Image (tube, rainbow, N blue to C red):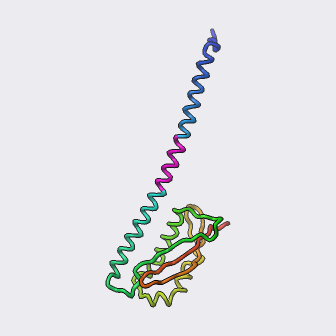
Amino acid sequence: MRVPPFARYQRLLANFGLMVSGAIIGSAVYMSIHQHTYTQLYVEMHKYLQENRDLRADIDSLNKTKNKQSLINVVNVHLVPKNQDELISEDIQKEIESDIKSELKLVIGQKATYVKDAQPLYEKLITQKTYVLHDKKYIVEVKSIVLIQTELTVWITAQEKRT
């Protein structure tokens, strides 16, 4: 049996190997750019869906208490960082805010005087509560609760629980 002389095809094989490695590197670069763009699109879509849900809930609560000025109409929740070292990603912040907003949904439609008197109760409802998001646990604490006319605003902090 005769073995073909590979010395004739040495440059051809080297060029073919270079072309294949270029194709692999190019596809890896393309996939990383595509994945980054897709991730940004997902985060933006999640933010808009959450904003849409919040606005629909606000419309429902405002329609429910349209003619009653002494009732709570809107609950706003703001998450502020506890310290500058641990920054929580924007989508997790929105999820924590929406979870707390859904827990405080029972306030909507109540008289403002009752809510003002029961502020410590609502604070205890939220403080030291653990939320599990994306396989991480977050502990929430209330910084302040402010009642202005028919709007209840809650400022909270969240910290990732280290186990």
Q: Is residue 41 above or below residue 17?
A: below
Q: Can residue 159 be seen from the camera position used here?
A: yes
The residue located at (46%, 83%) in the rendering is: 148
Q: Measuring 45% from the left and 77% from the top, which residue is drawn there?
A: 75
Q: Nearer the viewer, residue 62 or 103?
A: 62
Q: Is residue 118 above or below residue 143?
A: below
| Magenta-span inclusion, residue 112 | no
Q: Quadrant of residue 50?
A: bottom left
Q: Given the current orientation, which residue lies at the most extreme right position?
A: 163
Nearer to the camera, 147 or 162: 147
Q: Position of residue 131 (x, y in %)?
A: 56, 69
Q: Which residues are magenta?
A: 30-42
Left or right: residue 113 versus residue 131 is: left
Residue 34 falls inside the magenta stretch: yes
Q: Where is residue 144 drawn, in percent x and y?
A: 55, 80
Residue at screen point 50% across, 66% down: 94
Depth order, front residue of 150/107 = 150
Q: Main secondary structure of the magenta part?
A: helix
Q: Position of residue 11 (x, y in %)?
A: 61, 18
| Image quadrant where one finds the N terminus | top right
Number of numbered callouts drawn = 0
Q: Is residue 1 visible?
A: no
Which of the 4 image quarters holds residue 15? top right
Relative image position of residue 105 (x, y in whole percent) = 44, 77
> Quadrant where the C terminus lies?
bottom right
Picture quarter containing residue 129? bottom right
